[in-house]
Amino acid sequence: MTTLVIAEHENGAIAPATLNTVAAAAKIGGDIHVLVAGHNIAAVGEAAAKIAGVSKVLVADNAAYEHQLPENVAPLVVELASAYSHVLAAATSNGKNILPRVAAHLDVDQISEIISVESGDTFKRPIYAGNAISTVQSSAAVKVITVRATGFDAVAAEGGSASIEAVSAAHDAGKSSFVSEELAKSDRPELTAAKIVVSGGRGMQNGGNFKHLYTLADKLGAAVGASRAAVDAGFVPNDMQVGQTGKIVAPQLYIAVGISGAIQHLAGMKDSKVIVAINKDEEAPIFQVADYGLVADLFEAIPELEKLV
Amino acid sequence: MKVLVAVKRVVDYNVKVRVKADNSGVDLANVKMSMNPFCEIAVEEAVRLKEKGVATEIVVVSIGPTTAQEQLRTALALGADRAILVESADELTSLAVAKLLKAVVDKEQPQLVILGKQAIDSDNNQTGQMLAALSGYAQGTFASKVEVSGDSVNVTREIDAGAQTVSLRLPAIVTTDLRLNEPRYASLPNIMKAKKKPLEVLTPDALGVSTASTNKTLKVEAPAARSAGIKVKSVAELVDKLKNEAKVI
């Protein structure tokens, strides 16, 4: 039994979600191989070889894989998949884009966003925005699975010494091409990997007011997130959205500011260790999941909080 | 250009579902059902493409029970020209749905297929990508902007780090994200007109598609409940609790 983990990487570095995905592979048991697909990615391959528990790294270095276009990367994974019992990817926008294409080519059902491994063929995953947990058993010869990072503690990025093997297969479907990218630039920790997350909702009133949250976040070393309402209203960009269809976070501390607590938002943060809610509406549903609730005007509470932490 | 839009009948997004006592699934008896919100966005995008003169015909398709005709009628009222129901009372996996849609794509030969990125019941986020794989088409998932020009379409996608634009050769598959558009409401005259629009009913057997699955749901449970904590009276008390009780700052 050997599991293939598709590495997520950006700017020449392994993305943190890969370490959680390897942790899920370790729970399944057996050998763990990692596929690094991209262009000019020798350094990523070397970093992947150091991940604890990984025995082999496959490096597919080709211009066709540079932007992770699913039309090109999925056939590569399919070609490799027959040698494996499981193919895993992080449930990131990239993993979600590529893996169902792999599953369809292999003619197997995919299991999306697992949060636990019960055995080699049985997994738990949330459905209905996390209002139910489904236990799913797969009879597929190759089990194709995306992994919700918050369900698994990351393995160590250092300490392993896997062998590195080049994969020469080049797949260029010629059906799609990369045009451009607009990436959010931030010096703050990445939302899904941060130990503390400060999120703002409709109560922030406008995008300019998010500066209060940025100041607080910088003092706490926190990432800044937002509810769908705040993103839809144009206060902040979409990559900050926490929720059922945005990012799933589970930090040590989640501070929800001016967020009412719709089911869809709770789905993205209710596994946080400690939840703080600051809202002037004491009936807001967010208080039903908060460990510490403060009924207050956020524009008074946040500057005070910033001073005291 | 012909556009195919797939829609799914799901529990309304405002409903908080409950797990059945026997752990066989969630209780959907007497629960309000609606069109999946992402599918509404897909229908709206197709209608806008038709209003711009890019799309000439919009065919809407649903895979589901007889009652899914309600959601197809809604799509017709919003501006789709005709509808197809592939009727199945079984709960189908994303792969089975993708195979059925592939059969419809083969029959209809659309230039563009628009689907929601995920259904809010199974939360799978698979069907569009699987349909693209089975059809051999390019895919633009999680779209926040769709621009057709000539024989290609530019799709701006919402990705974890921001936004990415890809160019896809037509025919292609697009799945919608929340910011693509704001769906309209159907007007009463259009709801009346929709009743007269054609709605064809097919079966998986008639399409020659097997809906067998490699996944089996063993049980469905309620998540571990998170209980409400305490209300603090001041910011100072909050900071004290976070430092000395929770020890997280």
Image (cartoon, rainbow, N blue to C red):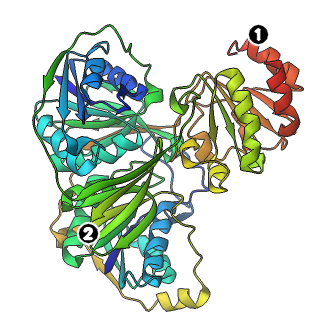
Tag 1: amino acid? Asn
Residue A162 in the image, given as x and y percentages of width and height: 21, 14
Alpha-carbon span between mark 1 and mark 2: 60 Å
Quadrant in which the N terminus of chain B is drawn? bottom left
* Residue identified by numbered label 2: B170
Q: Is residue A138 left or right of residue A257?
A: left
Q: Quadrant of residue B156?
A: bottom left
Please state the chain letter of the residue tagged with numbered disc 1 in the rendered image: B
Question: Does B183 appear above or below A122?
Answer: below
- How far across and down, in percent of the image, does residue B97 sit? 29, 60
Please report the residue visible at 54 percent of the width from the left and 42 percent of the height from the top: A131
Q: In x, y percent, where is residue A67?
A: 31, 44
User: For mark 2, does the 10 Å Cα neighbourhood hold few (<14), some (14 to 19), or many (20 or more) residues?
Assistant: many
| SS of the residue under disc 1 | helix
Q: Can the viewer see residue B218 in this picture?
A: yes
Chain letter for mark 2: B
Given the image, on which type of amino acid does mark 2 rest?
Answer: Leu
Task: Using the image, determine if residue B194 lies above or below residue A103.
Answer: below
Instruction: For label 1, count other residues whose C-alpha is less than 10 Å away and answer few (under 14), some (14-19) or many (20+).
Output: few
Query: Could you tell me residue B168's position as x and y percent?
Result: 29, 62
Q: Nearer the viewer, residue A270 or B109?
A: B109
Q: Which residue is mark 1?
A: B244
Relative placement, left or right, of A19 versus B96 is right
